[in-house]
Amino acid sequence: MPHILIVEDEAAIADTLVYALQAEGFATRWLGLAGAALELLAREPFDLVILDVGLPDISGFEACKRLRRFSEVPVIFLTARSEEVDRVVGLEIGADDYVVKPFSPREVAARVKAILKRVAPREPARAARAGAFRVDPLRAQIHYHEQLLSLTRHEFRLLQTLLGQPERVFSREQLLDALGVPAEAGYERNIDSHIKALRAKLRLVAPAQEPIQTHRGLGYSYTPER
Ligand code: CA
């Protein structure tokens, strides 16, 4: 039974969606705030998210952007006429579809079914190789020279980001963004200490190699061993 998360602050609208989706055999969960929804999505897998654009805490657009840092779950935006999402905006943010209020709940249920059918054959993200590294995003694990690294959450995301684009120089700000930490918080120096810790762990496995490069005044990159 697919699990659908509905994020909508208007109870009457949420109710009609819950009713229509349950009638189609979906399990539903309803939350009224984006912040709570993001927390839940980080903990529990859902098959699809219906996300209101006009939420009281942060906008649905912003919520979707943050969601895309850790999840590829399909998203349908709900938007009031006055909010006018255009398709391009929705797709740039990583949404799969949108419906304009007032809508028929059955139409939303039909869109949900269509999207789930489309994404069903999608294979789960598989382990990818980068040089001596093997990244398994589902298990949040990275092996280096076939040894499992014991990484903190931030170290995992940092290394995964660097490995994702070999030779690309990432600024500290970009790396903070990959960690989901706001750059204005003055955490840029924290990146340096995470990198230092990460290098120490890599050196334990392969003392002679230096896969993470420092670019003075610019940031860091991953260079595959030759
Ligand atoms: Ca609303």
Image: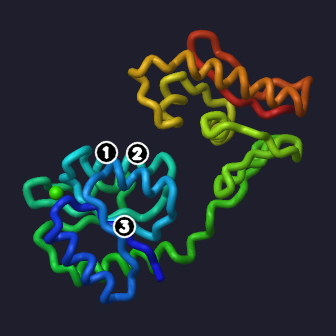
Which of the two labelled residues, at mark 1 and mark 3, occupies the earlier sequence position? 3
Please, what is the three-letter code of the amino acid marked with disc 3? Answer: Leu
Q: Which residue is depicted at the point 72% across and 56% down?
A: 127
Please, what is the three-letter code of the amino acid marked with disc 2? Answer: Arg
Relative horizontal placement of residue 179, taking residue 204 as reference (left or right): left
Q: Contact (CB < 8 A) between labels 1 and 2?
A: yes
Disc 1 secondary structure class: helix
Q: Which residue is depicted at the point 67% across and 37% down?
A: 152
Q: CA distance from mark 1 to mark 2?
A: 6 Å
Q: Position of residue 36 (x, y in %)?
A: 35, 52
Quarter assignment of residue 224: top right
- Does the numbered disc 2 mark a residue whose Cβ is under 8 Å from ligand 1? no
Q: Position of residue 75 (x, y in %)?
A: 37, 63
Residue under pointer 3: 5
Residue under pointer 2: 66
Q: CA distance from mark 3 to mark 2?
A: 16 Å
Nearest the eye: 214 or 137: 137
Q: Quadrant of the C terminus?
A: top right
Quarter assignment of residue 189: top right
Disc 2 secondary structure class: helix
Residue under pointer 1: 62
